[in-house]
Image (tube, rainbow, N blue to C red):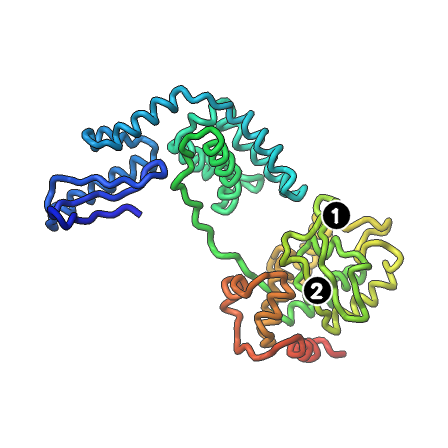
Amino acid sequence: MARIYARKENNRLVIDFSYRGKRCREQTSLEDTRENRKRVQKLLDRIEAEITLGTFDYGKHFPGSAKAQQFKEMQVRSQYLDTPLFSDFANTWFAEMRIQWRTSHADTVRNTVDKYLVPAFGEREVGRITKAEVLEFRASLAKVTSRSKKSLSPSRINHIMTPLRMILNEAANRYNFSSPYQGIKSLKVPRTDVEPFTIDEVRLITEKVRPDFRDYYTVRFFTGMRTAEIDGLQWDAVDFDRRQIMVRSTIVNGEIQSTKNDGSFRAIDMSELVFDALKHQYEATGDQQYVFCARNGSPLSHNNVTKRVWYPLLRHLGLRKRRPYQTRHTAATLWLAAGESPEWIARQMGHSTTEMLFRVYSRYVPNLTRQDGSAFERLLAQHFSA
């Protein structure tokens, strides 16, 4: 972080800042007084602004500095630096990184590169892209609207910028130039929007939903499984003897994949309601591969289920429209309301620590005294008993 301090030897003010990954300290001729500190602070603010915009000229501000000559030589070398076009290097980078990613993530990155990055930087040499151009590109994304006519959210913009950062940083390492992305921070993202259903709303939904989807939503509400996890759930992952659901795969775009991360690979304890729902579902689809599936045995299409079952049901019941993912938030808040142990809840949700639990659901945390699922069983018995 940039700062101003005075040398002990002569009481002269020194500007201490970073430029192109190097620490720079330049002594001024001004003594350490309140007025002089204000003057030097204004200079430092201007320097930082110019560095951010990519217009900083070291020699202009410090013409007699040895570092000014060093950076001038770097600038001259960079003018003769032979680097590939951004589009070519982006394709090389993607081909090298592809093996590390799940198919769905690779498809997302490929779409981001083709839709946003290549149109903006494709014909530019990757070594000549400036920080100002990167910031201008990010600012332009804020003006882009989605299909719903809404502006791109800070989170979406950050996801678009991530491949750009990775591409520029890798190119900088490979071709020995200073990455223009250095010092650019991600946009601040609002906290996760949590709109869980109440226990009475859950009971209403599971009572009024189409009979062929009652078991599906019962399992969703009381296990906290993600959409891709429950839609990809297969019978060999359901252990009735141990009363556990083994979450070890997901389904994305019709393709079975491994879970999102190591923490997502987990065993979910079945409550009595979930156990009964899965036993009942087994009578309908026990001879199929997937627990919840279409009549021909193929996995459910979450878009069709959402549009044809979930949203119509909420409208019919007069409930506020909420994404199906809120069933996961509902499970977490119900467990918290029952007083279950945060560590146990985190394991059920597939979180490696309780940090996200408290960050996302802090206002739903009452006294935490329980160690397992027993308190939750009592809550369900009070509201779902015949």
Q: Is residue 152 visible?
A: no
Mark 2 residue element: strand
Please state which amino acid type lies under the numbered disc 1. Ile
The answer to whether residue 172 is left or right of residue 243 is left
- Residues packed near mark 2 inside 10 Å, few (<14), some (14 to 19) or many (20 plus): some
Q: Quadrant of residue 29?
A: top left
Q: Position of residue 361 (x, y in %)?
A: 53, 65
Looking at the image, which is closer to me, 222 or 168?
A: 168
Residue, disc 1: 256
- Quadrant containing the C terminus in the rendered view: bottom right
Mark 1 residue element: strand
Compute the Cα span from label 2 to label 1. 18 Å
Q: Position of residue 304 (x, y in %)?
A: 73, 48
Q: Which residue sits at x=26%, y=27%?
A: 69
Please state which amino acid type lies under the numbered disc 2. Ala
Q: Quadrant of residue 92?
A: top right
Figure check: 21 above or below 375: above
Looking at the image, which is closer to me, 198 or 351?
A: 351
Q: Which residue sits at x=75%, y=74%?
A: 272
Residue, disc 2: 267
